Amino acid sequence: MVNVESRPAPARPGTAGLPVVLTATLALAAGCWVLAAWLMNGMDMGVATRPGTFGFFAAAWVTMMAAMMLPGAAPAFVRHARIAGTVLAALPFAAAYLGIWALAGVVAYALDRPHGTLAAGVVVIAAAAYELTPVKRHFRRRCRQDSGSGLGYGLCCIGSTIGLMSMLVALGVMSLFWMAVVAVVACAQKLLPVRAAIDVPVTLALIGLGLLIVIQPSLVPGLMPPAM
């Protein structure tokens, strides 16, 4: 009788460092929050905010996107590294992901125009309506599942959060407060499944915010530029 010793299956090469991927991603996001707060200091003028030069805006935008999007994307980075069998695979994946967001910043800079509270309110209401569309649900599911490439993952996440990001630009692209609000919602949607019990109240809250901006913008903190 042959005595076969039971041994645990060996771990896939490189996967022992997966916690490092998660920790490094979250640490980078935290550092970018600090840097974004420094870059945006004194820039927030509500709907009157101007993006500044393209070079400054590009640096601020990439920093903002890293701060806002990396926490929700961290599980996808880990998942991709696990599938590839090496933690190093997370680096080009993350670089491509942030590269897509950098290109989105170019579009945001090109489309940003001076606007008032009425336009900001309309954008917020439109963003709220987008939250319950089939297109949003499709990209949100893909954003939670897709880890094939950083490019594809980034495109899916942009499709999922385009309404929220439009809202950020309309309310004040240099606002740390609205940046935090959008980041929390976007991160939750990356990590949580689609559920009407959660998504519908969020959508209604955004519609209420948009109506408040249209009807009584002075009640929304930070929306109007400070009086000189």
Image (tube, grey):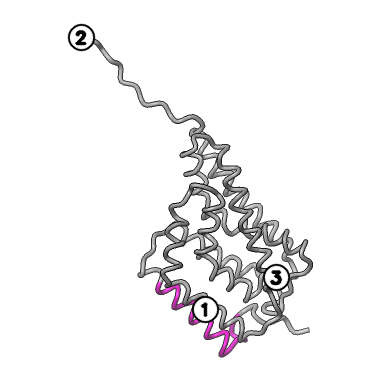
Question: Label 2: how many residues lie within 10 Å, few (<14), some (14-19) or many (20+)?
Answer: few
**For residue 126, which numbered disc appears in the image?**
1
**Percent coordinates x, y for residue 18 in the rendering:** 51, 38
Residue span colored magenta: 200-220
The question of residue 81 being in magenta is answered with: no
Q: Which residue is mark 3?
A: 110
Q: Which of marks 2 and 3 precedes in the sequence?
A: 2
Judge whether 224 appears above or below 160 on screen.
below
The answer to whether the residues at label 2 and label 1 have Cβ atoms under 8 Å apart is no
Residue at 30% from the left image edge and 20% from the top image edge: 6
Q: Which of marks 3 and 1 precedes in the sequence?
A: 3
Q: Amino acid at mark 1?
A: Ala
From the viewer's perspective, tell me whether residue 21 is left or right of residue 224: left
From the viewer's perspective, tell me whether residue 85 is left or right of residue 195: right
Residue at 48% from the left image edge and 80% from the top image edge: 207
Residue at the limit of the structure toward the top, as seen here: 1
Q: Amino acid at mark 2?
A: Met
Image quadrant of residue 195?
A: bottom left
Give the alpha-carbon distance from disc 1 to disc 3, as whole Å.
20 Å
